[in-house]
Image (tube, coloured by chain):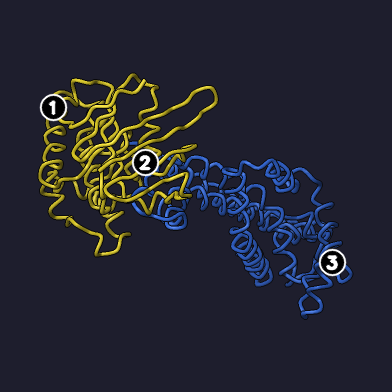
Chain colours: A blue, B yellow
Amino acid sequence: MLSAEEWDILRLSLQVSMVAVLAVAPLAFACAWGLARGRHPLWVLLDGLVHLPLVLPPVVMGWLLLLAFGAQGPVGGWLAEHGISLMFRWTGAALASAVMALPLMVRAMRLSIEAVDPKLEAAARTLGAGPWQTFASISLPLAMPGVLAGMVLGFARSLGEFGATITFVSNIPGETQTLPLAIYAALQVPGQEQVVTRLALLSVALSLLALVASEVLNRRMGRSHVRD
Amino acid sequence: MFEIDVTLRRGERTIALQCASAGGVVALCGRSGAGKTSVLDMVAGLVTPDEGRIVAAGHVLFDSAGGINLAPEQRRCGYVFQDKRLFPHKSVEANLLYGWRLIAPEQRWITPQEVYDLLGLAPLLHRRPVNLSGGEAQRVAIGRALLAGARFLLLDEPLSALDAPRRAEIMGLIERIRDSLGLPMLYVSHQRDEVERLAALVVEMD
């Protein structure tokens, strides 16, 4: 059904998205926690920053990543001293995906954290649990379905990431050419309609699967929060 | 056993209480909104008084003059909340053993089996909190507090939202805990007649 080349594209896409989501999940959770619980006015600023990739043109995000992570950039220069470069590498594609997925993940996680009743955490404290034990045994498990839903949603967003990726790490087959980039490349060449169709159907199937998984997790969150 | 002298200012309102008892049950009565639950929260360490001193079961929990303010997890109060606050993602058994597993073995003064027998909890152990009736949830909440190595109990309207037979049952259990375990208790109620036969000291708040 799929050619060897197309299998490689699929594998690379899954790899990029998986790494992007897993790498950015702790940051997303920390942001979500701060936005849900933080009282400091500065959290409003972070709220805006986190949501920037949702509204900015992706090509602008890609350009910003180029500025920061390019060989001359503040982060890229530092990484280069340690022999690491994200430019034109699949890791760069994962970074672009992670940044673009962050707002969606934060939103889903924030909702689930806001649904955790602080009164249950207070009860845990009176039973002898310190703040970290309370977090690990009460807050995190109660928020977990929403956290997972956010990760699945972020994964779906990563699979579809195009603009920031092509701007930041270009469209290199076998290295940075994920599904959307491969579809775009195939569209440029006459006679590739069948390839486009197969890859597009694959995209639809993957996205649908991820959205269904995310929705199932969301419903489980609804159930686990039924009060006694 | 209790020595409470606290002041808490909340905007225009001031909640203040002074009382001392040698042991047994101290009942806090008064209309709703008088700040009874706030007093329990202050004793539990969930709310910090503006000033005052709280001593319970021989331990200083809070002393604004002495700069003492123990964290809730260090106070070992058995707080039975009005809304129970059982953990919805854990089984009844895991709820009961939550505090038991956290405290040092030498701080455990009652075994799970003793608590199950005392409160009739054995048939409930594998249920989920969401599937408990009001009286059952109340028994689990009391058991969970005892097993956390509580040195004293804080009971917030333990009979509210229960029908008459359940009220009698829970009241009987509280009397047994008072008599057989000798645990000091701070008992909040908005009905004075409910606590009169139970309490050694009744404090009116308004």
Q: Which residue is mark 1?
A: B197
- The chain containing the residue under callout 3 comes to A
Furthest toward the front, the residue is B65
Q: Which residue is mark 2?
A: B43
Query: Residue at image x 83%, y 59%?
Result: A167
Q: Which mark is residue A74?
A: 3
Image quadrant where one finds the C terminus of chain B: top left
* Sequence order check, earlier mark of 2 and 1: 2
**Which circle, 1 or 3, is nearer the viewer?**
1
Q: Secondary structure at mark 1?
A: loop
**Which circle, 2 or 3, is nearer the viewer?**
2
Horizontal side of A195 relative to A185 (left or right) equals left
How many marks on residues? Answer: 3
- The chain containing the residue under callout 1 comes to B
**As shown in the figure, which amino acid type bears the numbered disc 3?**
Pro
- Same chain for mark 1 and mark 3? The answer is no
User: From where the camera sits, is residue B137 visible?
Assistant: no
B189 and A40: which is toward the camera: B189
- Same chain for mark 2 and mark 1? The answer is yes
**As shown in the figure, which amino acid type bears the numbered disc 2?**
Val
Query: Residue at image x 17%, y 55%?
Result: B110
B3 and B158: which is toward the camera: B3
Mark 1 vs mark 3, CA separation in Å:
74 Å
- Same chain for mark 2 and mark 3? The answer is no
- The chain containing the residue under callout 2 comes to B
In the rendering, at what x and y percent does residue A201 appear? 63, 53
Instruction: Tell me the quarter of the picture where residue A97 sits.
Output: bottom right
Mark 2 vs mark 1, CA separation in Å:
24 Å
